[in-house]
Amino acid sequence: MRENPDLPRSLLVLGGTSEIALATARRLIARRTRTVWLAGRPSPSLEQSADALRALGADVRTVAFDALDPASHEAVLGKVFAEGTVDMVLLAFGVLGDQARDEREPIDAVRVVQTNFTGAVSAGLISARALQDQAHGSLVVLSSVAGERARRSDFIYGSSKAGLDVFTQGLGDALYGTGVHVMVVRPGFVRTRATAAREALPPTTTPEAVATAVERGLRRRSETVWVPGGLRVMMAALRHLPRAAFRRLPL
């Protein structure tokens, strides 16, 4: 397959065991990517993920990374960028939490927000600065349609994603014209192992579909990607629905 210069030759994945991230890495390896850093908490799953990507022909390295330890991010990510050019950073870590439990145990709710938002702000700013120093590269951030409007069933998770989404948009504006491309990805309900026990809200999607949309967004230099694309229209309607009516929806 002919290489596309809009796609990365080197990829840093923050959240190296994420099914969406791994599906994206597989797709990019099939097109152009040759070097991958998988960053995450050391575990057999992280090593297995690395081995699976190596089997596809990529040079894969694992990096010990903890979203809940922002004080370590500068050193950890600095070492990766010191090893060579990074064409793309995929920020894919996050936790769903348990809404009922998190409402009863505020410390658990804080952990969701610290992982999904605070950790992402730290890692995102550090990665953005390194990409800016290179004068090129893409920062792709996995947000969620859950951040578009607070729902009774998952407002803690949704609020963390809302913060991440707004942060990413602002960061993209700050980096406009520097050569760094920032793209926020807003999937609907993604069918993964992590969501297997949850009731799916249509329209649903898959890690592979998100990976396809990420590739398309990179080729187009998109700033926002919805998966599936029809969510853009649906959420535009829901966003402006009066709260009294929104509360009655089975969401």
Image (cartoon, rainbow, N blue to C red):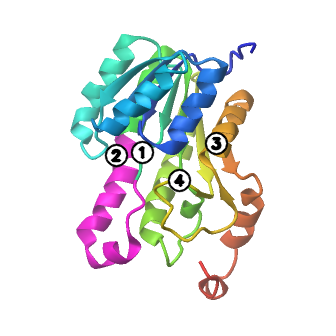
Question: What residue is pinned by disc 3?
Answer: 208
Q: Earlier in the sequence, mark 2 or mark 3?
A: 2
Q: Quadrant of the N terminus?
A: top right
Helix, strand or loop status at disc 1: loop
Residue 195's spot in the image, x, y percent?
A: 50, 60
Residue that label 1 marks: 93
Question: Marks 4/1: CA distance?
Answer: 14 Å
Kindly report which numbered mark, 4 or 2, lies closer to the viewer in this rendering: 4
| Position of 228 relative to 106 (above/below) | above
Residue 208 x, y percent position in the rendering: 64, 42
Residue sitting at 32 percent across and 54 percent down?
114
Nearer-the-camera pick, 239 or 76: 76
Look at the numbered discs 1 and 2 and tell me whether their residues touch, using CB distance below 8 Å: yes
170 or 207: which is nearer to us? 207
Q: Is residue 5 magenta?
A: no
**Dot 3 and dot 1 residues touching (CB under 8 Å):** no
The residue identified by callout 2 is 119
Front-most of residues 231 and 242: 231
Q: Nearer the viewer, mark 2 or mark 3?
A: 3
Q: Nearer the viewer, mark 1 or mark 2?
A: 1
